Image: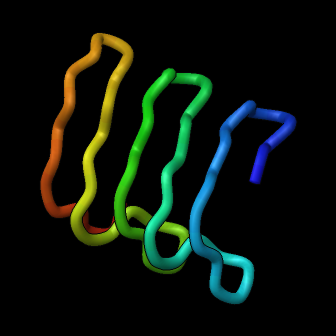
Amino acid sequence: MVDKTSGDIYNGDYIEGKRNGKGRMYYASIKEIYDGEWVNDRRQGEGYVLNLKGEICSGEFRAD
């Protein structure tokens, strides 16, 4: 999925039109990547964030 307005890119699983399961999201406005689990369009479960500075933060996400 590519959002032409924001430039965000999502590559992963969908269920009933929402991000669910494993997926990777690139947030163009903040130049950040989230790779991990999704539930009902929110970051939920194990995942990591890679930011513009090259820092990686990993852990358990709850309700985004």
In the figure, is residue 35 to the left or right of 11? left
User: On screen, 10 above or below 53?
Assistant: below
Closer to us: 7 or 54: 54
Quadrant assignment for the C terminus: bottom left
Which percent across, then down, holds residue 33? 44, 36
| Residue name at image x 59 percent, y 23 percent | 29
Indicate the quadrant where residue 39 lies: bottom left
Indicate the quadrant where residue 28 lies: top right
| Residue name at image x 30 percent, y 39 percent | 49
Q: Which residue of the protein is positioned furthest toward the right in this rendering?
A: 4
Which percent across, then down, holds residue 31? 50, 22
User: On screen, 35 above or below 53?
Assistant: below
| Residue name at image x 49 percent, y 61 percent | 23
User: On screen, 57 above or below 32?
Assistant: below
User: On screen, 55 above or below 2?
Assistant: above
Which percent across, then down, holds residue 13? 58, 73
In the figure, is residue 36 to the left or right of 48? right
Q: Which residue of the protein is positioned furthest toward the top in this rendering?
A: 53
In the figure, is residue 8 to the left or right of 52? right
Closer to us: 6 or 1: 1
Which percent across, then down, holds residue 6? 74, 33
